[in-house]
């Protein structure tokens, strides 16, 4: 069975926090079955008060989202129960490329990879070299382009495979 690992390496388009994109929700049954459940998105106050695991289920009782702590790690599952997105926020200690982690200035990630800011998602993605987004990871800053706020820290990561959404 899978377990949360707050120190796990962040691998673009693959894994983070001890979980792999594409895995089935049944692989975290031990975690899900012992967690508190809601049939709606939790409020900010509910997340702030969460010190364990909180599971969001849809109207068919299927797991859609798993929150660890006050949203340190969030797992998003598709309708088939496959993990398509891992969000990582404050309290996550793992790194991307051994040095880029929560709190690192976004400009250091930009030095590693040219970043493109997506105003719709309000996240920065890796430029594929032709001005297009290279999928697999997004860096969450202050919801503004690096040029407008060059000193913004990384507040979170979004490791994803949108094709599994």
Image (cartoon, helix red, strand yellow):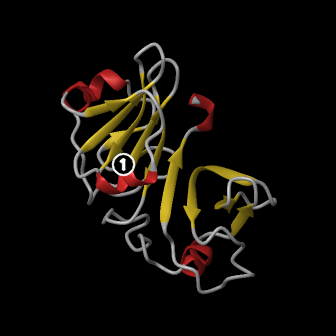
In the image, taking residue 142 as reference, residue 38 lies left or right, namely left
Secondary structure type for disc 1: helix
Q: Is residue 98 or residue 69 the one in the foreground? A: 69
In the image, taking residue 99 as reference, residue 49 lies left or right, namely left
In the image, taking residue 43 as reference, residue 1 lies left or right, namely left
| Up/down of 144 relative to 59, above or below | below
| Up/down of 24 relative to 8, above or below | above
Residue name at image x 35 percent, y 25 percent: 25
Q: Which residue is mark 1?
A: 46
| Up/down of 50 relative to 27, above or below | below
Whether residue 1 appears in this view of the structure is no
Q: Is residue 116 or residue 88 the one in the foreground? A: 88
Residue name at image x 29 percent, y 45 percent: 18
Residue name at image x 24 percent, y 46 percent: 4
Residue name at image x 38 percent, y 66 percent: 90
Whether residue 103 appears in this view of the structure is yes
């Amino acid at each position: 069975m899978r377990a949360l690992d707050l120190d796990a390496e962040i691998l673009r388009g693959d894994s983070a926090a001890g979980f792999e994109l594409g895995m089935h929700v049944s692989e975290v049954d031990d975690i899900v079955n012992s967690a508190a459940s809601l049939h709606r998105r939790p409020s900010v106050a509910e997340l702030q008060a969460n010190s364990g695991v909180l599971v969001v289920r849809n109207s068919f009782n299927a797991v859609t989202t798993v929150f660890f702590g006050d949203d340190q790690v969030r797992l998003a599952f598709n309708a088939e129960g496959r993990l398509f997105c891992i969000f990582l926020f404050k309290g996550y200690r793992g790194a991307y490329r051994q040095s880029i982690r929560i709190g690192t200035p976004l400009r250091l990630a930009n030095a590693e990879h040219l970043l493109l800011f997506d105003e719709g998602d309000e996240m920065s993605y890796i430029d594929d070299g032709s001005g297009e987004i290279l999928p697999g990871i997004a860096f969450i800053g202050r919801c503004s382009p690096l040029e407008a706020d060059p000193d913004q820290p990384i507040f979170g990561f979004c490791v994803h495979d949108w094709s599994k959404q």
